[in-house]
Amino acid sequence: MIKKIPILDLKKQIAPIRKDLNRAIKDVIDNTAFIAGRQVECFEQEVSKYCNVKYAVGVSNGTDAIKLALIASGVKSGDGVICPAFTYYATAGAIASAGAIPVFADIYPDTYNISSLSIEEVLRRKKKLRIKAVVPVHLYGQCADMDNILEVARRYKLKVVEDTAQAFGAEYKGKKAGTIGDCGAVSFFPGKNLGAFGDAGMVLTSSKIIDEKLRILRNQGNKTKYHHLVVGYNHRLDTIQAAVLNVKLKYLDSWNKRRQGNARYFNQQLKGLEIQTPFVPKYTTHIYHQYVLRLNGPSKELVEHLINKGIDSRVYYPLPLHLQECFRYLGYKKGDFPESERAAEQTLAIPVYPDLTKRQMDYIISSIKEFLQ
Ligand SMILES: Cc1ncc(COP(=O)(O)O)c(C=O)c1O
């Protein structure tokens, strides 16, 4: 009998590196520099090297990373900011908490990432709004169509903040996700491919001015202690999280490779069936934060079937953002973003984490086949 297969098994990931993690955490406790300890700066330097980007600013989580990136890029209260209707809530939540107005655009049906055609259509339609920025999301672990997005952004003078919460380590035409636009916002939520032991995030940028603004904004508007230049926030990355992430970063590429291997196996074994495996365009790599399948009709019954078989399958995300209660004030209705609505209905994610065994994958595959027959 196969035991339950979770959507992610962090215990298996942590076990082989437990000693190093314990030592790193003990070091922080011994030094008691819980805020702004040397591990924060060290992790920022390691990320900046890993991503080949000039500046990396540690912050409290991915949501705050998006918010701070927007504010530091010059987005002001009442400005419009475009993002996809099909993403996790936090993308639009961060826009709203920066005081801006989320403006939704639709996605491409094959990659589930924001469509540059839809962005342009929104810009033409919403001429009265001061639209200042766009937040493409690299959903599930592969990059959005950045060249076309940057081209539209250039024409309309928009800032580009990449939501890299799910794609840290993926590459767009050889460049790391999050280093292509004005800023990249990263999440190190525990379930991400590189996850902390709590909340953590980072903003990537090649602009010295934005880097300086971010460092002030994340630390109560301080440049020197008790002298507040702007109304800032308590959005710092804490030292214990940085220490944990410093240990785990070394393993990220090998973990991502194993996810890619698992995805390849699923692709091969599900080929020719009435189910669509992930489409990866040539311009991007995919680090499979999620491995998402699509049916011709609703995915709900397959999700239920897999759960009954002990396989933790999920829908990311079942209700697009334009139909969420909290964004009702924006005035959208059902039918506004058909591709987002269809994706929400027809997709499902299955486990793809690095430590998944062949036996577990075969069981997932045979359970899917059983449903399709
Ligand atoms: C697409 C996307 N954006 C933003 C976030 C927010 O990140 P965090 O949970 O670290 O605030 C997440 C993750 O939860 C996400 O998946």
Image: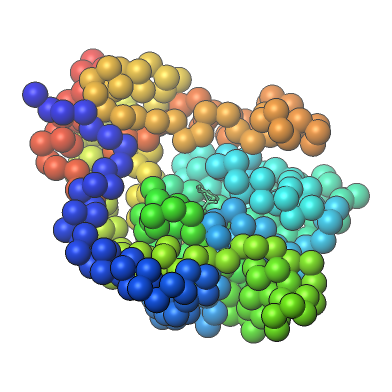
Q: Position of residue 81 (x, y in %)?
A: 74, 53
Residue at horizontal 91%, vertical 49%?
A: 128
Q: Position of residue 42 (x, y in %)?
A: 42, 79
Relative to 276, is 25 above or below? below
Residue at horizontal 66%, vertical 45%?
A: 93
Task: Name the residue nearer the viewer: 21 or 313.
Answer: 21
Q: Is residue 141 visible?
A: no
Q: Quadrant of the N terminus?
A: top left
Residue at horizontal 65%, vertical 68%?
A: 218
Q: In the rendered view, does 368 fall on the left or right side of 240?
A: left
Task: Name the residue nearer the viewer: 122 or 225.
Answer: 225
Q: Position of residue 186 (x, y in %)?
A: 51, 61
Quarter of the image holding residue 309? top left
Residue at horizontal 70%, vertical 43%?
A: 104
Task: Name the residue nearer the viewer: 272 or 52.
Answer: 52
Quarter of the image holding residue 351? top left
Q: Quadrant of the C terminus?
A: top left
Q: Is residue 322 visible?
A: yes
